[in-house]
Image (cartoon, rainbow, N blue to C red):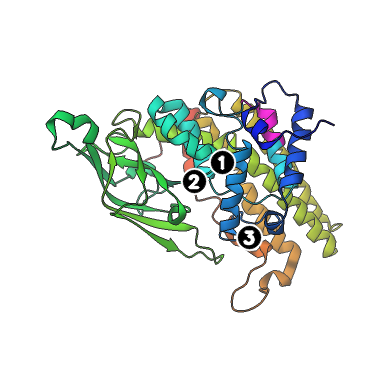
Amino acid sequence: MNEPMSAAETSKASFASMSDDDFRSHAQQWLAASVVGEYAELKGRGGPGDEEVGFDVRVAWELELGRAGWIGLGWPESHGGRGASVNQQIIWAEEYTRAQAPARVNHMGENLLGPTLIEYGTPAQCERFLPGILNGTERWCQGYSEPNAGSDLANVQTKAVLTPSSNASDAAAHAQWVLNGQKVWTSLAHVSHWCFIVARTEAGSSRHKGLSFLLVAMDQPGVETRIIRQITGGGEFNETFFTDAVTPADMIVGAPGEGWRVAMGLLGFERGISTLAQQVGFERELEGAIELARQHGKLDHPVIRQRLVKAHTGLQLMRWNALRSMGAGVPGPEASIGKLFWGTWHSDLGELIVDIMGASALIGDHLPYELSLEQKLFLFTRSDTIYGGSNEIQRNVLGERVLGLPKEPS
């Protein structure tokens, strides 16, 4: 077995020429040496419905990952990435989960915004923002949904107006967008440095037209976040208000009015490679369900056993579909297949876990409102078929944009 690389060596080396077996060995060694102390004490905590647990420790862990070069594995080397293959990214997700490393705090930056900037952004935008994601110092949140524009994202009403500089000799450098509106379900907005926002920038426009994709600093006057307390007890969701908030004119990804195209491209990345790490987490949850069935004497119960087998089969189908879809380059509307499938699968798994636990699933760990991880999982999975585009919207996307069926009557 090769000696593990030092942090300095790791952060400079490319993985493109490394075999999968060598990469797995290297990842295992680094994780074994690094997931220690307070990081090991978390035991992988901080996932769905559990995001507030150990947040400061997880922020420190993100810096560790950045120093060692484990962020942006699949990004091109020309943009600071490691050139890791899809197989290597899957291996990393597998070993990361098996090591029970802390849950990550910047999924939005690494897996969504980063690839979007690489695909649609300017060189200056990449130079400004990619390093902060790679070294773990800048966290991002997503400004898509609004009170009247959730799954129906084209109904966005948040407005941004480009105001010229008063300095005629330097107008281009000092012009800025002024934003007014409200976003909701902006996960971790209260601890994020930046937000990528879909806003309406053409007066009188409607639906998909006249939208732009803007990058906005959160720490400024005119940006207010309010925590939305969930049934799980957590408060990672927020509603965010923009009142004359500003961002420079060049903080737009793509041209004005191209926001829908960029936003859909980003959602394609969300449905693509980032789901593989998620599926490894699903695998651990399924293993937990099997262990629960064993503890409750239900492993041989014919119905429970059949549902466990169905869950295992579904997990394999998810993996194969994700691998197939990533072979087509930048994901298209077909990626909605994955969201529709895993949202339903995960919701079903939450119900299965409760059915395995029986009456004990209705009893909290202790007062006043302390939930077990299994109870948090069940409650959180009630939202899986809604957030990120409801099942109904995913079916519409597939029917209209993939199968060419007539649009649903309005």
Q: Residue 217 location, x and y as percent?
A: 36, 46
Left or right of 98 on screen, residue 226: left
Residue at the location (29% across, 47% down)? 158
Residues under labels 1 and 2: Cα distance? Answer: 8 Å
Decide if residue 225 is in sight here. yes
Secondary structure beneath dot 2 equals loop
* Dot 3 or dot 1, earlier in sequence: 1
Disc 3 to disc 1: CB gap under 8 Å: no
Left or right of 399 on screen, residue 86: right
The residue furthest bottom is: 367
Residue type at numbered disc 3: Phe
Task: Work out whether residue 134 or residue 394 is closer to the camera in this orientation and state it.
Answer: 134
Residues under labels 2 and 3: Cα distance? Answer: 18 Å
Q: Which residues are magenta?
A: 83-91
Task: Work out whether residue 156 or residue 284 is closer to the camera in this orientation and state it.
Answer: 284
Residue type at numbered disc 2: Gly
Q: Residue 370 location, x and y as percent?
A: 62, 72
Left or right of 10 on screen, residue 19: right
Q: Where is mark 1, residue-wise? A: 339
Disc 1 to disc 2: CB gap under 8 Å: yes
Residue 171 is covered by the magenta coloring: no
Q: Where is mark 2, residue-wise? A: 388
From this view, report whether residue 165 is shown above or below residue 18: below
Residues under labels 3 and 1: Cα distance? Answer: 18 Å
